[in-house]
Amino acid sequence: MNDRSAIAKEMKFARNILKMKGSSTLKAAQTATRLKEEGKDVIDLTVGEPDFDTPQFIKDYALEGLQKGITKYTPTAGLKTFKESISEYYSEVFGADVSPNEVAASCGGKQALFNAINTLVDEGEEVLIPKPYWVTFPEIVNFVGAENVFIDTEETDFVLTADQVRDAITPKTRLLIVNSPNNPTGRVIPPVEMRKIIETCAERGVYVITDECYLLFVYPPGEIFTAAVLPEELRKYVCIAGSFSKSFAMTGWRIGYTIAGEEWTKQMLKLQSHSASHPTSFVQYACARALQNSDAMGNAVGEMLAEYERRRDYLIPELQKIDGLKTEMPEGAFYAFVDVRDLLGDRFATSNDFAEGLLSSEFVVTTDGAGFGADGFVRISYATSMENLKRAVEKIAGFIDQ
Ligand SMILES: Cc1ncc(COP(=O)(O)O)c(C=O)c1O
């Protein structure tokens, strides 16, 4: 009889899943966790999530939901109150006109992206992705058997422009995926340019997914821009992938949403109805109640943003002082994207060697840029304490000096 490992070796997996790679950012984070478990004094700069706890009032609303018995299945698109609260929040905070029928709750921004891409793109079609990119975008495109067409944005300091999009569109282009504020670069596309990008796509019948996962994390004087404010004729080409994870420090709650035209939404709901069904009922309730309390939401975000800004204002100038490192001031999110190419040569052949050296010598964990399509860079998250950042800066400078 075959033993288990022999069976596993013979096992054949679906073509689509074999086209997908595991998440490289999760790998770096797992290394950090393993070293911490081994008792090492690790400074983890890989974190893609806020180091703040979820605001207490949101937790209280979740308890209220449980007490009220909101523990059963909900509609696939989410509780009526969830959809209405998103619609009202977008109207109140951004002046956008979003119908509750255009909103669908999802298990985080990731599922929103998965639903949107899977319902729109066919095998062989082209999907435009600005580079550097968040690791999940090309992998979902791989999964559906479409072609990733990367737009290099280094020339424009990692800020995508409408001209770059226009040049990349071909008759096979189906979709552009754009993410601002951006992970991994922290750059923000100015509202005027974002509008032009979407117009450029819409004029050519190309759809756009705007990943607005870091929407509220734009540092003053930058402007928050959601595609939800665009006029109807542009909005029908757009699907917004939204998330509560980062803005409200709720990564573990797994709650996000899409805002898209009703037809696109219906197709996404069909897919979701046969997979996750919907995000957790009382989590939807908590989010709905929290959004209705937009003052409390605004204060909670404001406090977190101010702290991220304080860290950014310390970290970036300190990194800029270190010989061999180049980095720009990010306008949003909580990442510094650092060019280490001046250090490459005999000591480190690649940014991955640099990141590994920093890890093994100093136990400072960063994420190599190669996973984001940007070899020669590392991503440093400042979703960690000021104390950690100060220690990290010293260790990085010491390591490079060696
Ligand atoms: C750019 C971007 N989009 C979407 C997500 C998904 O977040 P979640 O699924 O937790 O909402 C992340 C998480 O790291 C992200 O960085």
Image (cartoon, rainbow, N blue to C red):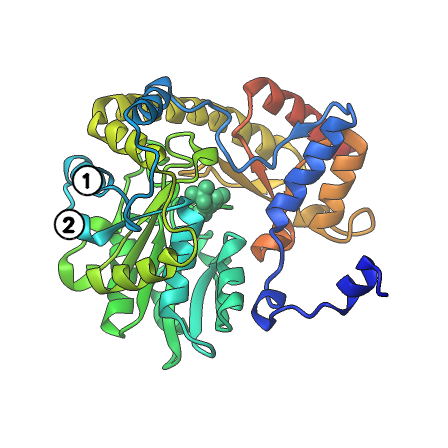
Q: Amino acid at mark 1?
A: Phe
Q: Quadrant of the N terminus?
A: bottom right
Left or right of residue 318: residue 155: left
Query: Is residue 160 in sight in this rendering?
Result: no
Does 91 appear above or below 286? Answer: below
Return the x and y of residue 134 as percentages of the image width and height: 50, 52
Which label's residue is closer to the chain start, 1 or 2?
1
Q: Residue 213 occupies which quadrant of the picture? A: top left
Return the x and y of residue 102 as percentages of the image width and height: 21, 53
What residue is shown with label 1? 94
Q: Which mark is residue 268?
A: none
Left or right of residue 267: residue 398: right
What residue is shown with label 2? 99
For the residues bearing labels 1 and 2, Cβ distance under 8 angstroms: no
Return the x and y of residue 130 as percentages of the image width and height: 45, 60
| Residue extending furthest toward the front | 1
Nearest-to-viewer mark from 1 and 2 = 2
Does 376 appear above or below 390? Answer: below
Along the line of sight, which residue is nearer the eye, 94 or 354? 94
- The response on whether ligand 1 sits within 8 Å of label 1 is no
Which residue is found at the position 38% from the left and 39% from the top? 280
Q: Secondary structure at mark 2?
A: loop
Q: Secondary structure at mark 1?
A: helix
Which residue is found at the position 35% from the left and 36% from the top? 218
Return the x and y of residue 86 as percentages of the image width and height: 23, 40
Left or right of residue 82: residue 218: right
Q: CA distance from mark 1 to mark 2?
A: 14 Å
Q: Quadrant of the C terminus?
A: top right
Q: Amino acid at mark 2?
A: Ser
Which residue is found at the position 24% from the left and 39% from the top? 82
Query: Is residue 286 in sight in this rendering?
Result: yes
Does 113 appear above or below 398? Answer: below
